[in-house]
């Protein structure tokens, strides 16, 4: 049992993991004391290291002998079944709570830091502008080392942005735009280079797709990304299938990462099993490598120590926990991160929007009429069953998907607050709230479609050509 530590590590609580590490440490000491054969000791030490890594990945803290993870243990033992159900990894987001995933708990579990008022104020001072509504409203809610990025920026040192998308189909929905809308804002206010990875290789490995189709989706999705308003002189978009084979800088970093992460470690972090294809097992190195500036010699002039900031949804964090663990061992700075919450499905915040269920999403190709019908028909409501009850008891914004969407897309803080109060008091009915959302989304999506029309194949090619950007390094 102790010989296969990673097969079920994901299901262990921090305390159980702590006990496994302690046990394994004792085993190593006993083997050494008993002068056991070297290969036996080595195997036990390797397992100890991998257990320690899993412990760190789960709790965000280094294992310290004799110091069990007390606060985490308390959280895990003190919750009800319902609250315990949150499951988040790069492929699955599930909770039984209608308010959505408990993000504060996720911060503790992942070992990241909360984006608090102090940090938001510091960002505001650094850029001299009002912070984006995604920051003001806790949509980007967690970070790693954002203070370092601000410190660099305040001292006139540059950094760069990296984000990405897995092009699994042609159909992008509004939820997919969240990281890009925010990244566009970051690029504008900080005026830094941006690289966008399209993981067509990942989608080929995970989905039932040909490489040709995956590459085609990458180029189609690039159009929607470009339509968010990125500056061609400051942005490089690349398909893995295409760029990997042409860039020695990128591939060198991939093999560096591959050399420093063991199968045991990726099993622990991503839950891979012995029957997963080796493409999946080595893929995390490909998502890690763009975090290092030397992967883009044409942009950074071979500079290796430029720090990277990655805006992404929190489910991508496992990739970057691994990246941050490897970085110092291969002589690079750790990337900093900004994490967003998930964009809820129309049916409710128990899961994120899915491109494969047309009724769970508002697509970027939807007509005004489709938007209206979908919201009226499918958006989960926190309103009461009858008008009388609603007037008397009021609606519940915490579970109301229309209200949640408005927090993402309605820019006016005062208006949002008024809507919240009116809905909660019962003055505003569900149909009326839905109408506000419909009238917010229809012009927003129509404008996106208009901008996307301007993005020709030629424009995509410009963004996707490896080249120097408008920055000197
Ligand atoms: N794996 C991501 C997805 O499936 C795509 C991705 C690659 C990404 N690199 C990234 C996302 C960096 C955020 C940041 O969507």
Image (spheres, grey):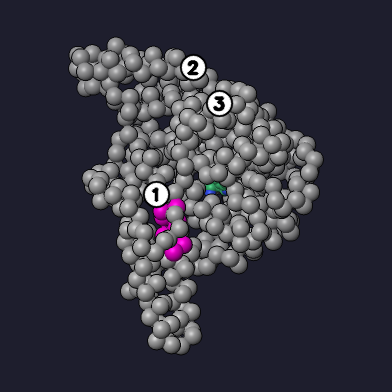
The residue lying toward the viewer, choosing from 80 and 429, is: 80
Mark 3 / mark 2, whichever is N-terminal: 3
The residue lying toward the viewer, choosing from 453 and 340, is: 340
Which secondary structure, mark 2?
Answer: loop
Q: Compared to 50, does 292 lie above or below?
A: above
Q: Which mark is residue 412?
A: 2
Q: Which mark is residue 53?
A: none
Q: Is residue 198 left or right of residue 144?
A: right
Residue 371 in the image: x percent, y percent? 44, 25
Q: Name the residue: 33% across, 65% down.
A: 19
Please provide the residue range marked out in magenta. Answer: 52-60
The residue lying toward the viewer, choosing from 3 and 428, is: 3
Q: Which mark is residue 131?
A: 3
Q: Which mark is residue 109?
A: 1
- Few, some or many C-alpha atoms within 10 Å of disc 1 (few <14, some 14-19, many ≥20)? many
The alpha-carbon separation of the residues under discs 3 and 2 comes to 13 Å
Q: Compared to 264, does 454 lie above or below?
A: above
Q: Name the residue: 70% across, 51% down.
A: 305
Residue 242 in the image: x percent, y percent? 68, 53
Identity of the residue furthest to the front in this view: 66
Quarter holding residue 227:
top right
Mark 1 / mark 2, whichever is N-terminal: 1
Count of numbered marks? 3
Quarter holding residue 472:
top right
Q: Name the residue: 39% across, 27% down.
A: 404
> Which quarter of the rendering shows the N terminus?
bottom left
Q: Are marks 1 and 3 in contact (CB under 8 Å)?
A: no
Question: Is residue 442 rendered magenta in the image?
Answer: no
- Few, some or many C-alpha atoms within 10 Å of disc 2 (few <14, some 14-19, many ≥20)? few
Residue 351 in the image: x percent, y percent? 37, 40
Q: Compared to 469, does 435 lie above or below?
A: above
């Amino acid at each position: 049992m102790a010989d296969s530590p990673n097969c079920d590590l994901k299901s262990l609580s921090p305390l159980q993991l702590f006990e496994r590490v302690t046990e394994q440490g004792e085993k190593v000491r006993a083997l050494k004391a008993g002068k056991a054969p070297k290969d036996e000791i080595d195997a036990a030490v390797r397992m100890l290291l991998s257990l320690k890594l899993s412990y760190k990945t789960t709790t965000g803290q280094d294992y310290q002998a004799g110091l069990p993870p007390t606060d985490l243990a308390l959280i895990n033992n003190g919750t009800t079944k319902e609250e315990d159900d949150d499951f988040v990894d790069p492929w699955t987001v599930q909770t039984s709570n209608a308010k959505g995933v408990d993000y504060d708990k996720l911060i503790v579990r992942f070992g990241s830091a909360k984006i608090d008022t102090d940090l938001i104020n510091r960002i505001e001072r650094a850029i001299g502008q009002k912070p984006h509504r995604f920051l003001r409203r806790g949509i980007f809610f967690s970070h790693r080392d954002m203070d370092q990025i601000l410190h660099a920026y305040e001292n006139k040192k540059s950094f760069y942005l990296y984000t990405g998308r897995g092009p699994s189909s042609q159909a992008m929905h509004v939820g997919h735009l969240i990281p890009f809308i925010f990244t566009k804002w970051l690029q504008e206010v900080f005026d830094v280079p941006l690289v966008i990875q399209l993981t067509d290789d990942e989608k080929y490995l995970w989905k039932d797709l040909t490489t040709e189709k995956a590459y085609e989706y990458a180029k189609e999705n690039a159009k929607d990304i470009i339509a968010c308003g990125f500056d061609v002189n400051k942005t490089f978009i690349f398909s893995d299938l295409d760029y990997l084979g042409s860039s020695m800088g990128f591939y060198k970093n991939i093999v560096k990462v591959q050399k420093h992460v063991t199968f045991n470690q990726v099993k622990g972090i991503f839950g891979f099993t012995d029957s997963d294809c080796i493409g999946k097992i080595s893929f995390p190195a490909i998502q890690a490598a763009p975090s290092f500036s030397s992967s883009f010699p044409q942009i950074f002039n071979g500079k290796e120590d430029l720090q990277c900031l990655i805006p992404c949804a929190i489910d991508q964090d496992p990739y970057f926990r691994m990246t941050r663990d490897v970085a110092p061992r291969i002589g690079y700075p750790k990337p900093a991160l900004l994490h967003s919450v998930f964009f809820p499905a129309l049916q409710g915040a128990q899961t994120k929007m899915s491109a494969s269920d047309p009724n769970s999403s508002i697509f970027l190709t939807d007509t005004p009429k489709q938007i209206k019908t979908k919201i009226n028909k499918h958006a989960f409501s926190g309103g009461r069953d009858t008008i009388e009850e609603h007037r008397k008891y009021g609606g519940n914004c915490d579970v109301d998907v229309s209200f949640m969407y408005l927090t993402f897309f309605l820019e006016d803080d005062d208006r949002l607050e008024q809507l919240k109060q009116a809905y909660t008091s019962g003055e505003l009915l569900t149909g009326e709230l839905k109408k506000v959302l419909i009238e917010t989304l229809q012009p927003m999506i129509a404008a996106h479609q208009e901008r996307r029309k301007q993005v020709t194949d030629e424009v995509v090619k410009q963004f996707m050509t490896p080249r120097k950007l408008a920055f000197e390094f």
